[in-house]
Structure formats: C-alpha cells, structure tokens
Image (cartoon, rainbow, N blue to C red):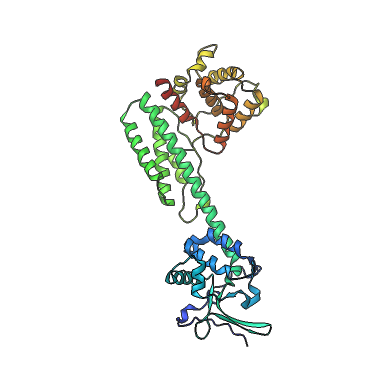
Amino acid sequence: MIYHPITSFRRAADAVPRELVVPKDHAGQSAAADKWDILRTLSSARTALGLSDRTLTVLQALLTFHPERVLDADKGTDLVVFPSNASICERLNGMPCSTMRRHISKLVKAGLIIRRDSPNGKRFVRRYGSERDAYGFDLAPLPRRYGELQDLAEAIRVEQQCYDRVRRALSLMLRDLKALVEIGSHDHPAPLWDRLGDCTLLAARSLRRTMSADEMAVLQQDLCSAIADARDALGCPASTELSTKDAQNEHHIHNSNLKNIELESAPENHQPTKPSDTNRPLEPYRTSSDLPLKIILDRCKEVQTYATEPITDWRGFHTAVEAIRPMMGISTSLWHSVRSRMGPQTATITLAAILERFGHIRNPGGYLLKLCSKFEAQEFSYVPMISALNNLSSA
C-alpha cells in the first residue's frame, strides 16, 4: 500500500500542501518540464513569490538530488528527493543547517515543494520490487506550476520594461528642461529660471533613486508644468505633447497597472515626408515643439553665412539648409531617409547644428545617421545640442 501524507512531522495541520487548498490555474497543461528551465523562470518571478536569491540556491541544491533533467509530476513518488540535512548543506558550500531549514520552509510556504515526512520524520526510501515508498521533499509542484510561474515572470518583465521606459522618458524631459533653463537664463534673465533650475535639481535627485509609480507620476506632472512655463517664457507656442492637461489625461501612471503607461519624449514626431515631395515648394513646418527661430539662428550662425539672403522665417531657414546640404557631403538618398524618420523640422535643425561643428566632425553623414537612430530610440533631442553650441561659442 502506498500512501502520501498531507501533513508534516511535528507540524500543525495548517501545513497541508498548497496543491490541496489552492485550485490549479493551469490544470490542462503538461505536468512535465525541464528542471533548469523552471529554476530560470523562478529567478525572474521570485520577487512576486517573496523569495530571495539564497532561497533559490537551496532549491537548486535540492534539484541536483534528482537524477533526471525533466521533472514529470505524473510519476508520483519519482519526484521525491530524500537527502539528509548534512548532504544539503554540503552542496550549499557549508551553509548553516538552521539557515538552510529556514529557506526550505520558505519554499514549502510558497508551494514550490511539499514535505513528505515519514512516521518518524526521517527522509529515506524503501523499495518493494518495482514500487517504492519515498519520504522527503516532493518536487512535483514545480512542473505543475510551471505555466503559472511563466505568467508571473512575464508580468514582472513587462512591468519592468514599462518602468524603465517611464524613467527614460523622465530623463529626456529633465534633459530638455535643463537645456531650456540654460538658454532662458542666457537670453531672457528672470527669476523664473532660478525656480526652474531648482526644479531640475530636485528632479535629478529623485531620478537617482528607485521611485514608485506614484512618485514618477508626480514627477512627470512637475516636469510637464516646468517645461510648459519655460516654453512660454521663451515665446514657444504651447505643445500638446507636453501640456499639463495631456499629462493628466494621457500620461497618468496607475500604480496597479504599469502596462497602460504611454509616455512620449520631448522630441516631436513629425509626419514623414516622401522623397518625391522634396522638389516641391516647402510647405509650412510645424513649430509647436521647436525653439524660437531667433534662438536657433543665434547659435547656428554658419547657416546665415552661406545663405543668399537674410533668413527671416522658417521657410528661409529650411531653404538655406537645403542648399548647404550637398556641400556638407550629405547625399540626397541619406537626406530623404533622415527627413522621413526624424521629420523635416528636426532633421533641418540638427543638420544646421552639425554645420556649426563641421570642422570637428570627420563624417557628417554618418554622424547625422547616428543621431537619427538615437532620435528613433527616443535618446536624442536637438534642444541640448543647440544649447551646447552656445557653450562652444563662449568657450
């Protein structure tokens, strides 16, 4: 007769195995899985189960006592391992027995292993012909819960990706705000820039530590408001992408569901322009999220040097840069690609900034293509680039 006990030796009745009191969410799934795949999945999902890396190290040691690589829960007692405490601690490089037993209890509480204690609490196996009675630690919950563990690991991975994306967006907003403060302090001295400068210092301090979703939501609203104030002071029309109202409606971060986060970085996403359109008369360009033309011309003086007539508006600026582009070694095909990917406004301002440092750039075409790739990855904005030109000219 083979009987599998549901209680542990000298332990209360509340130590009933988890599989008997919790319904299986993946009942129809195969009960066989690679033990090392399970361990790798657990490494990603351990925070959701409240487990530490040392607890998983103890589980790894237990897995080494099972001779087969694939764990099949349908084999019953074949998944019961019965090492002594001394043997387990030896494979854990001398971990104290009390520490090892504490981590074993965490694995049992998490429902990853089950105690199958003998009447006297010892771990051993007795064979009766082709059958056997094994008492020790049952690894059967691991393959049975593999699907559940995969879902937990995927949820944590997606949440971490969303968290990282929000932090990157906040970093970009902070970088643009710093550049706007630097430009405003130089061109339009006012008490406003001291307040916004303090805002950048506080935001930078917050981003240096781990933040909760609610804290990032508050920081995002502060940065949106500060950028809007800076743009108003510089004479830039309000941007729908960075307005406080849109930040509240579209960019709200909910603490319990980071999957719905949608944050956009400061660079403007222009509509692509087809290569065939470049020979047509220039259409009006959107300037809702650009710096004022006067600030750009103050720092991109080389464009005016090569222009056939004074630049007084955006159309003249684009025309001048388009005329200079072949002399910089930027091929027509490359320019078409960059304009379509970055938008005409961003591409033209970026090329004008490159012209200012033309003598220091070995390959302007390659540099422009690299900035284009960074722009698509939301890692580039021309605002800090224009600000840096001011530092270069004053140096």
Q: Is residue 359 above or below residue 265?
A: above
Q: From the top left corner, tell me how far across and down residue 50 is, in percent.
A: 47, 64
Which residue is farthest left? 191
Question: Is 74 located above or below residue 170 in the figure?
Answer: below
Q: In which quadrant will I find the N terminus?
A: bottom right
> Residue 79, position in %: x, y?
61, 74
Q: Quadrant of residue 237?
A: top left
Number of on-image labels: 0
Q: Quadrant of residue 348?
A: top right
- Above or below — where is 358 with respect to 166? above
Query: Where does the image place residue 287, in percent across and percent down from the top left?
Result: 51, 28
Q: Nearer the viewer, residue 278 or 355?
A: 355
Looking at the picture, tell me which residue is in the foreground, 128 or 231.
Answer: 128
Q: Where is residue 272 shown, x and y percent of the image?
A: 61, 32
Identify which residue, 172 or 273, lies in the foreground: 172
Q: Residue at x 45, y 83 (%)?
A: 10
At a point 55% along the width and 60% down the height, the residue shown is 152
**Residue reaching furthest to the top:** 308
Q: Is residue 115 visible?
A: yes
Left of 81 or right of it: where is 215? left
Q: Does residue 67 appear to the left or right of 307 in the view shown?
A: right
Figure check: 317 above or below 180: above
Image quadrant where one finds the C terminus: top left
Observer able to see residue 25: no
Outermost bottom residue: 1
